[in-house]
Image (cartoon, grey):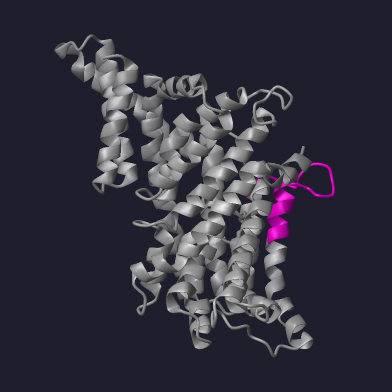
Amino acid sequence: MEPIDIGLAVSGGMLVMVLLGMRVAFAAGAAGMVGLIWIFWAKFGYNPDRFMKAVTVAVKTAGQVPHSKVSSQALSLIPTFILIGYLAYYAGLTRALFEAAKRWFAWVPGGLAVSTVFATAGFAAVSGASVATSAVFARIAIPEMLKIGYDKRFAAGVVAAGGTLASLIPPSAILVIYAIIVEQDVGKLLLAGFIPGAFSAVIYGLLIIGMAMTIKGFGPPVSGFTWKERFAALPPALPILFVVFTIIFFVYNPFGGDAFGTPTEGGAIGAFVVFLMALKHGMRWSEFKDALLETAKLSVMIFTIIWGVLIYVRFLGFANLPGAFADWITSLTMSPMLILICILLAYAVLGMFMDAIGMLLLTLPVVYPAVMALNGGEFVSAADSTFGMSGPMCAIWFGILVVKMAEFCLITPPIGLNCFVVAGVRDDLSVQDVFKGVTPFFIADAATIALLVAFPAIVLWLPSQAG
């Protein structure tokens, strides 16, 4: 068999393992090892006497992957971003954010749900994990909405959908993973997530207001807050802005000149700042230990997936599957934009059966080169490109699109992780209730993705200012 045929056969086997329930990390790692052994044994002419030689070479090739990639400085961002989120909870920032958002926005139709969305967006600015955001606000926001008569399914859907904003709004672990896989600038990708993330929150808010204005008895507004009470709620929430600005200054200096440091240093300082806030608010040793343990658990899970998938990616390189897929994509007679839309739709379907991180890690090594080829190559200028943007800018734009698709997958059945988290926190809700509650937000996400595709400037304006 030719290497490309081996690549297709092994990839098909891996997808079967994933669909049968095997963890992505182990399915990808096993498929990668089998594929490497198969490739090398084929090079030895399938000589039985040289099978063990093929195994030895494959093991050495795969063994180089974990250390060489995971020792990357950029990956150290992931545990620091996750730690920021857990410490922010113990620092009281979540409750302060929700209270401030409630006092400022609860007067509009569907105001408490709108407040929840904006509060989750604010918390996303200090949390790199969508799951943590959903879990925290399931405890804070859902009881408040139920008190004034919200349908429990919709209240759960608001929290689950709002939690997805942490995937786009920096600090974002998924954006860091994308940057590492496609070897792009982490800082510019983090910057690119700010406006689309805020844009997504606004779309969610408009959807809720529209539903409240057209459905009788839906989401009654909450009034009675004085201007004094509104302004009094701002100081407890201001530390969020301090942390955000700290991270921004270490990614991009808005006053001109070089940034103050690296994104890794910004993440570490952000975590330290939130740690001091948590201490000020009386965080106990047991709570600090829980934050560290939860951060370690989530970080180990992500790193394990990365290890397994990178072994599979190494095999794909030997099989030349990415290059073959890129050649096939560029040979199609369809419009490049239509091909891109089909790729995004494929992510929507694939996300119904895989977790977001695993899905991106498995597909990007093949899909990313194809998208870059559609645009004219990684080093094409804007004037000569298909989509009207340079290679590096196209990489950023596509990154935000696929991460937005990953957000979408966090709330789609049957394995929408955020929905399971919200149901797990609330005993009065089933997973089916949460899935029903997030249904309207599919429309909002579809509208957001369409606008990001039609108007790339929404994504590219801020990173373009960084030079």
Looking at the picture, tell me which residue is in the foreground, 431 or 208.
208
* Residue at the spot 44% in from the left edge and 24% down from the top edge: 325
Q: Residue furthest bottom?
A: 224
Above-or-below relation of 234 to 5: below
Looking at the picture, tell me which residue is in the foreground, 162 or 68.
162
Q: Position of residue 282 (x, y in %)?
A: 57, 80
Among the 4 quarters of the image, the one containing residue 106: bottom right
Above-or-below relation of 15 to 383: below
Q: Position of residue 286 (x, y in %)?
A: 45, 74
Which quarter of the figure is the N terminus placed in? top left
Magenta span: 244-264
Q: Position of residue 160 (x, y in %)?
A: 47, 65
Which quarter of the figure is the C terminus placed in? top right
Looking at the picture, tell me which residue is in the foreground, 272 or 339.
339
Q: Is residue 305 in the magenta section?
A: no
Looking at the picture, tell me which residue is in the foreground, 342 or 50.
342
* Residue at the spot 70% in from the left edge and 22% down from the top edge: 384
Q: Is residue 216 visible?
A: yes
* Residue at the spot 74% in from the left edge and 52% down from the top edge: 249
The answer to whether 261 appears left or right of 110 in the picture is: right
Above-or-below relation of 352 to 56: below
Q: Is residue 128 visible?
A: no
Q: Residue furthest left?
A: 48
* Residue at the spot 41% in from the left edge and 37% down from the top edge: 362
Above-or-below relation of 31 to 173: above
Q: Is residue 263 in the magenta section?
A: yes
The answer to whether 209 appears left or right of 14 in the picture is: right
